[in-house]
């Protein structure tokens, strides 16, 4: 019946470890909704970022334990709707979804899939005949599929969702506009923050800094912050940090330490071409701090960043393009303030936490 308060079982991981999907799930659960009551079955498969997406025997035991909790919680709370975030297509994650979804989702009247990782449809053609059958049982014909951007792969359409909607992320405003940035002797500080892996464009950013340093040495810094995806790449980045005066690594930062890092920086660089990228939450985190963003033309980035107005859109795998935009901002530091103001205005007009909760409440209200 239209207007009924839905009992929704949210199945997903919350921090730790701290990564985009877990943080977003925690934020979603914290909302107050007039048209839905949320219950949570916690899935805790990985304890560190290095374990995410990788097979360990203990994870298999945790998945089956999670399945039992999903079934128990469905009947304990009387939930009629399952909310789940499918994997981005890695085989290990697919099998997790198969084990959790095939026995349980049919117990619910309806399923909502929220694609916080993009690219599920693109993996289907690489599956075996058996895996394709399991894929269809796990994912096909949900009531609703939610994507974060119209520019993301059409995962919902591929799995034959009855309704496909776009709900962008929204975040709480952690910025104090009166707080001043330190001058750092007039240097412009470029920030990369997030999972540190090659497909996030970290090497491209370092190479851009090398190109820029020949003409602008002493006029800029690059800060990297986040947790490494693998040890081999960590060794490479550490060697670059040791060799390059302009490059610094701050480690993994969360909470107030993370916001302090935004205050200390002037421009975010997000040169991703990560295969499961769906939104780039860090883009709107930077926007709330009135920071322009240099980002690749990849997935939702063009939705979030208006080229020449709130930042710059550049081609993927293009260190030269990154260096050119960095050069423009170093030579015209006043443009950083102009672009940053527009970025914060865009955040306030569509990406606040209030916007996010309202969009979901409207969706819950529409479910029959």
Image (cartoon, grey):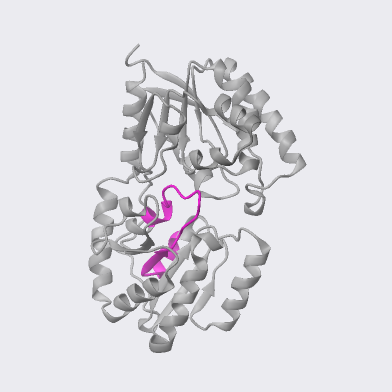
**Residue at the spot x=44%, y=37% of the render?**
155
State the image coordinates of residue 209 (x, y, percent, origin top left). Answer: 45, 78
Q: How many marks?
A: 0
Q: Is residue 178 left or right of residue 44?
A: left
Is residue 42 visible to us here?
Answer: yes
Q: Is residue 148 above or below residue 299?
A: above
**Residue at the spot x=43%, y=81% of the render?**
211
State the image coordinates of residue 127 (x, y, percent, origin top left). Answer: 61, 38
User: 146 or 152: which is nearer to us?
Assistant: 152
In the displayed orientation, state which residue is furthest to the right.
57
State the image coordinates of residue 124 (x, y, percent, origin top left). Answer: 54, 38
Q: Is residue 283 magenta?
A: yes
Quarter the N terminus occupies: top left
Q: Is residue 130 left or right of residue 349?
A: right
State the image coordinates of residue 110 (x, y, percent, origin top left). Answer: 47, 19
**Residue at the spot x=63%, y=31% of the render?**
129
Is residue 257 visible to us here?
Answer: no
Q: Is residue 161 magenta?
A: no
**Residue at the spot x=45%, y=59% of the render?**
272
Q: Which residues are magenta?
A: 259-285
Q: Is residue 351 left or right of residue 11?
A: left
């Amino acid at each position: 019946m239209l207007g009924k308060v839905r009992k929704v079982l949210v199945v997903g991981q919350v921090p730790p470890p701290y990564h985009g999907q877990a943080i977003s799930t925690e934020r979603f659960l914290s909302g107050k909704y007039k048209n839905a009551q949320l219950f949570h079955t916690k899935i805790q498969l990985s304890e560190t970022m290095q374990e995410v997406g990788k097979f360990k025997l203990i994870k298999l035991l945790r998945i089956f334990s999670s399945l039992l909790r999903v079934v128990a919680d469905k009947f304990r709370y009387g939930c009629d709707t399952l909310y789940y975030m499918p994997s981005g297509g890695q085989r290990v994650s697919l099998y997790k979804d198969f084990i959790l979804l095939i026995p349980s989702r049919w117990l619910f009247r309806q399923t909502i899939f929220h694609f916080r990782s993009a690219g599920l449809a693109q993996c289907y053609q690489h599956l075996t005949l058996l895996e394709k059958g399991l894929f269809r049982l796990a994912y096909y014909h949900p009531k609703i599929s939610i994507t974060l951007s119209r520019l993301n792969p059409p995962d919902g359409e591929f799995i034959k969702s009855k309704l496909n909607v776009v709900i962008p992320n929204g975040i709480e405003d952690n910025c104090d506009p009166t707080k001043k940035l330190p001058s750092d002797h007039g240097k412009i500080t470029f920030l990369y923050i997030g999972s540190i892996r090659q497909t996030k464009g970290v090497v491209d950013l370092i190479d851009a800094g090398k190109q820029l340093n020949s003409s602008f040495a002493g006029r800029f810094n690059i800060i990297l912050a986040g947790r490494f995806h693998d040890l081999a790449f960590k060794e490479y980045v550490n060697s670059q940090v040791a060799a390059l005066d302009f490059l610094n690594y701050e480690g993994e930062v969360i909470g107030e330490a993370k916001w302090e890092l935004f205050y200390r920086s002037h421009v975010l660089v997000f040169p991703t071409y990560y295969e499961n990228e769906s939104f780039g939450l860090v883009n709107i985190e930077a926007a709330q701090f009135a920071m322009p963003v240099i980002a690749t033309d990849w997935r939702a980035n063009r939705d979030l960043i208006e080229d020449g107005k709130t930042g710059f859109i550049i081609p993927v795998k293009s260190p030269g393009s990154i260096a050119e935009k960095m050069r423009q901002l170093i030579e015209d530091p006043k443009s950083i303030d102009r672009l940053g103001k527009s970025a914060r205005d865009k955040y306030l007009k569509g990406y606040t936490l209030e916007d996010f909760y309202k969009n979901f409440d409207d969706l819950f209200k529409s479910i029959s």
